[in-house]
Image: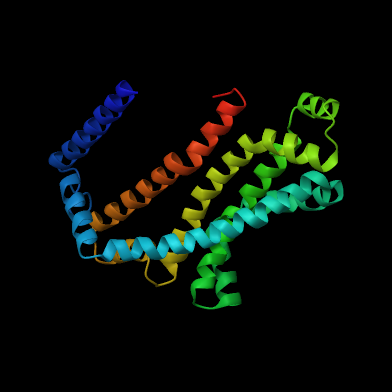
Amino acid sequence: MRKRIIKKIFFYIILFLLWEGLVLLKFWPEYIFPSPIKVFKTMIAGLQDLTFLIAIGISLRRILIGYGISILFGGSLGLLMSKFKSIDDTLCGLILGLQTLPSICWLPLSLLWFGLNERAIIFVVIMGALFSITIATDSGIKNVSPLYIKAGRNMGGRRFRLFLYVIIPAALPSIISGLKQGWSFAWRSLMAGELLFVNLGLGYLLMMGRELNDMSQVIAVMLIIALISIFVDKLILGRIELSIRRKWGTG
């Protein structure tokens, strides 16, 4: 464990030095490619004056609402598709097609339906994460090993109990992978909505940094988004996934 931490620290030190070295070589003007020190100073200033903290709170609220709805409807739809062949035959191709659409494609539709408000952005977040969760849930249940199902039946499991205590737990690794993918898609969708719809949030700060040619702010916001994603993955989704793998003897 200690060696892994040392390796990570060493890696980030090298990355920092490479970044600083590229700045010193002056391939690009500093307003286009700022130094890491300037970026960190911008980040600290934004946290101290609460600008970044307010934007983080607003963006997190939007993504948690949209992502939560995506889990609810995406998981339910995936379960229905895996359980009923008629639903799978009719919806599978449509969902695969809709998943290929970039998140930005949903924005004009959401603006026409909901107007310039919070619901428009949340709708884009939902549509960005929904289909990956649906497909992961559907494929996870369909790909459960027949041995597990036979063993469950031999132990007296029937229908609902077999589905609840055998099939769902066996499909959880695939479902968790879909949730992680959906989380990343939700962030992309959120940024697409906030960049084009002028309102407070991290996407708005990105847009303002671009408008003001303040690349240190742009990179600072990008780092904040990356840190939030890493935090959620390591402390929530990653831990759930590791716990499931250990339980099933694969981690």
7 up-or-down from 58: above or below: above
Q: Nearer the viewer, residue 14 or 160?
A: 160
Q: Position of residue 27 (x, y in %)?
A: 19, 43
77 up-or-down from 9: above or below: below
One can see residue 209 in this view: no
Q: Is residue 75 left or right of residue 177?
A: right
Q: Position of residue 246 (x, y in %)?
A: 56, 26
Most extreme residue toward the bottom is 115
Can you say which quadrant of the picture contains the N terminus? Answer: top left
125 up-or-down from 10: above or below: below
The mark total stands at 0
Q: Is residue 127 left or right of residue 16?
A: right
Most extreme residue toward the left is 24
Q: Residue at x 74, y 48 (%)?
A: 79
Color scheme of the displayed model: rainbow
Q: Residue at x 37, y 70 (%)?
A: 200
Q: Residue at x 16, y 46 (%)?
A: 37
Q: Is residue 31 left or right of residue 159?
A: left
Q: Position of residue 127 (x, y in %)?
A: 60, 59
Q: Is residue 68 left or right of residue 221?
A: right
Q: Position of residue 43 (x, y in %)?
A: 23, 55
One can see residue 32 in this view: yes
Most extreme residue toward the front is 156
Can you say which quadrant of the picture contains the C terminus? Answer: top right
Q: Quadrant of residue 18?
A: top left
Q: Residue at x 37, y 63 (%)?
A: 57
